[in-house]
Image (tube, grey):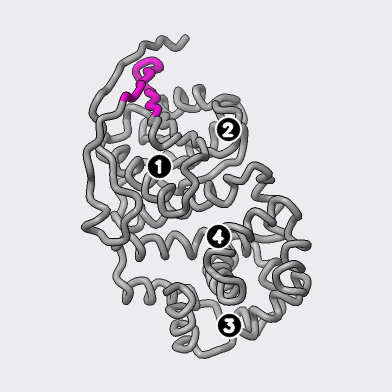
Amino acid sequence: MFRFFLLILSLITFASCHNSTLDDASYIEDVLETEVVEYSEEVNINFYKEMNAKFTVSTSVQNNFVTEITKLVQQAKGKWNFNSKKLDIYVVGANRQSVINLCDVYGNCSSDLEPFIFAMNGSEAFYSLRENTYGEEGIVVFFDTVFEDISFKRLAFHELFHAYQFHHKNASSIGALQVDGPWLIEGGAELFSELILYQLGYHTEEKFNSQMELKLLSKEEYLSGTIPLNKIQYGSSLRPYYLGAWFTVYVISEIGYETYLVDFYEDLHTFGIEQTIQKYFSTDIAGLIDNFNTFLNQENDVLLIELTRILS
């Protein structure tokens, strides 16, 4: 049986979430009342009222890692303006027993343990759409490991963008919006995880462009092949995340940055993919992908110029 008790912490260090440079993103101090519930010696839960986020953390996770995650959550929620969404965030560590205990807090351990173990091994972070302790949906899980700093930030922001994508009240499942592959949803998360690094000053413009050029690695193979973008599966050599990021660039070039971030996702969850694409592009999925292929067929230098234009 778990034993628990309450602790009250009065001073938590948070990061600024509305600014666009690295200096602006430095830590600020704020005095908040934070409730910490400790479950056995292995798991503790911190509820950050100002962020509408609850962190359930294995005690094998280093404190500075948890501090970094809270900083990134606040930055993402501020930049994408979804602070009203309540999130459960589970942070696993390298100790298997602590992961099992954390999974018990998460619930339904018999079916949900393996993803935690997978994350514990340093393989991945994942986002799961399911009912959380607030009666809403949206859980983000990160792993604790030795990791190159910017790579961790990129991964964290990728998963947090999934939380943004599904923060709408009518949000359906990720699977329902994939339509055979990860092109649409994962592509959006891939682009915006790079973009927010640039917007917050973690990336220079040159680094951002080089990362986006890297995502064109499978362009020629894709354009010379017969598999449409929405049929490319996870793990394919065609790199659906990368191609999906450029598909997102194309979508934004057609409908605009703010429309993509706000109205487009609202409509996806309200009307579904087919109707939403028809509304914004006056075509179906196949037609939209054909148009994207024409866009992608431009020289890389031209695509990077277009990238700068639409995101400036």
Q: Could you give the CA–CA distance between mark 2 and mark 4, rounded to whole angstroms?
A: 31 Å
Assign a secondary structure to mark 2.
Answer: helix
Asked whether the residues under the numbered discs 1 and 2 touch, taking CB atoms below 8 Å apart as contact, a structural biologist would say: no
Q: Nearer the viewer, mark 2 or mark 3?
A: 3
The stretch of residues the image draws in magenta is 33-47
At a point 39% along the width and 11% down the height, the residue shown is 4
Asked whether the residues under the numbered discs 2 and 4 touch, taking CB atoms below 8 Å apart as contact, a structural biologist would say: no
What residue would you read off at disc 3? 296
Mark found first going from the N terminus, 1 or 2: 2
Q: How many marks?
A: 4
Asked whether the residues under the numbered discs 1 and 4 touch, taking CB atoms below 8 Å apart as contact, a structural biologist would say: no
At a point 64% along the width and 60% down the height, the residue shown is 264
Mark found first going from the N terminus, 1 or 4: 1
What residue would you read off at disc 4? 261
Three-letter amino acid code of the residue under disc 1: Phe
Mark found first going from the N terminus, 2 or 3: 2
Q: Quadrant of residue 2?
A: top left
Q: Nearer the viewer, mark 1 or mark 3?
A: 3
Indicate which disc residue 143 carries. 1
